[in-house]
Amino acid sequence: MINFKHKDRLFTYIFGREENREWILSLYNAINGCSYSEADEIAITTIDDAVYMGMKNDASLLLHWTMSLWAHQSTYNPNMPVRELMYLGKLYDKFIHQRKENIFGKKLIKLPIPKIVVFYNGKEKKEEETVLALSDAFPSEVSGVESDVEVRVRMININKGYNRELMSACKPLSEYAWFIEKIRKYSGDYETEEAVDLAINEMPEGFLIKGFLVGHRAEVKDMCITEYNEAETMQLFKEEGRAEGRLEKAEQVYKNCLARGMSEEDAMAISGLRDARIAME
């Protein structure tokens, strides 16, 4: 079962901690095409209690009036725009209260520009970069109505062989992607905890994040186990949902067959209801 208590993801542990400001800045520069050098000016704004499926949003930070929201996905989720919109609202609320601004006043409040990025390394094949839009969720059958709100999320594929330029511009991100790939490789033959050990031990000495992972080995294992358990549970939810859908459809076909005067045996055979019920057991 999913642990619904708050847990950091490994991505957050590497790119969301105060002690790793240089790595955070490196990633910020790489995805925004900047060359800032003032890591001390980064304000980490991640909200600890903003939780979804037992996991908080991975990381958010404020630098030079840009509010960056970063998330990691090992399972593709097209609903990231609405999730990030809800999270961004919490960030703006926190920002306004900390600065003691008056949203009811006549003065226009200056807000940081939001930039939202999802780093994807799931098994499902995706393009190097995809833009997920909130408007994709709006019903297409409603014509003549233009939305007053849009949210765009950059989904960047960090699997092996993708976005080489970005990876070379941010060594910690490249190393993180290498580490996750190794864990995935070994998890087919070993328990997740053992796969993490093997990946850390095999990591080249020149990797910037190796010392950090070795020093926090127990925490890294715990986070990886939690993430893999979550992924497996979500897959079970999907499979159960598909089975339930088949059962409901089979039951409806069965009822329709009976209504047309078929025998129970014929209706059972045509609808596939017996097989659908067995699949749910």
Image: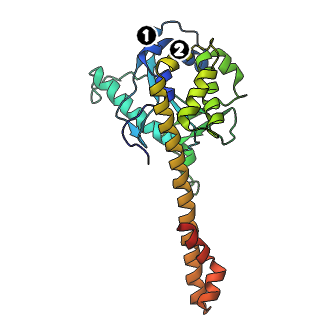
Observer-nearest of 139 and 176? 176
For label 1, the SS is helix
From the image, state whether disc 2 or disc 1 is nearer to you: 2
Q: Nearer the viewer, residue 15 or 45?
A: 15
Residue 90 image position (x, y, % from top left): 36, 33
Rendered location of residue 43, percent (x, y): 40, 16
In percent of width and height, residue 281 lies at: 52, 68
Q: Which residue matches tag 1?
A: 41
Return the residue found at the far top: 37
Q: Is residue 100 above or below residue 224?
A: above
Answer yes or no: do the residues labelled 2 and 1 have beta carbons within 8 Å?
A: no
Q: Return the residue nearer the eye: 110 or 272.
A: 272
Distance between the alpha carbons at the discs numbered 2 and 1? 25 Å
> Is 272 left, or right, of 229 in this rendering?
right
Q: Is residue 254 above or below residue 150?
A: below
Query: Which residue is rendered at x = 63% and y = 78% of the image?
Result: 271
- Check disc 2 and report its element: helix, strand or loop: helix
Q: Is residue 55 left or right of residue 30?
A: left
Vertical placement of 250 versus 223: above or below? below
- Mark 1: give few (<14), some (14-19) or many (20+) Cα within 10 Å: few
Residue type at mark 2?
Answer: Gly
Residue receiving disc 2: 211
Q: Does residue 64 appear anywhere in the picture?
A: no
